[in-house]
Amino acid sequence: MAKHYETDFKLMIVNLLKSGQSARQVSEDYGLNANMIRRWLRENLSAKESFTGKGNISLSPEQREIAQLRAELKEIKLERDILKKAVSIFSKSDN
């Protein structure tokens, strides 16, 4: 099970990185994975409101809509591909 860290803790770690401490040193001092704390730093630098819940970055309404449309497009493409295969199978059995 993944461990979840509080927003305040993540922000404290990010501030240590911003103050010049290395990710390796901070990870050793706090027993954290260096890649994870680098990800926290990237999330904090790239988002206005980072760490809004269980590590998820808050998205603008436009970003949420784009993500929803991408998921819908992926599902529709999968359905299309399944139908293409079904048509191919049935047309072979007709011959």
Image: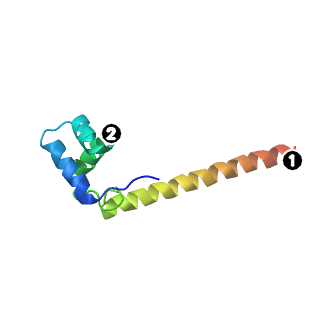
CA gap between label 1 and label 2 equals 56 Å
Q: Residues within 10 Å of mark 1 (few under 14, many from 20)?
A: few
Name which quarter of the figure residue 63 lies in: bottom left
Q: Residue at x 33, y 44 (%)?
A: 36
- What SS does tag 1 mark? helix
Label located before the other in sequence (1 or 2): 2
Is residue 61 in view from this perspective? yes
Residue 20, label in figure: none
- Horizontally, residue 19 falls left or right of residue 86, namely left
- What SS does tag 2 mark? helix
Q: Which one is nearer the viewer's eye here, 23 or 72?
A: 23
Q: Residue at x 60, y 51 (%)?
A: 78
The picture places residue 77, in percent across and down from the top left corner, at 57, 51
Please state which amino acid type lies under the numbered disc 2: Asn
Q: Would you name the residue on which mark 2 appears?
A: 35
Q: Residues within 10 Å of mark 2 (few under 14, many from 20)?
A: few
Name which quarter of the figure residue 67 lies in: bottom left
Q: Would you name the residue on which mark 1 appears?
A: 94
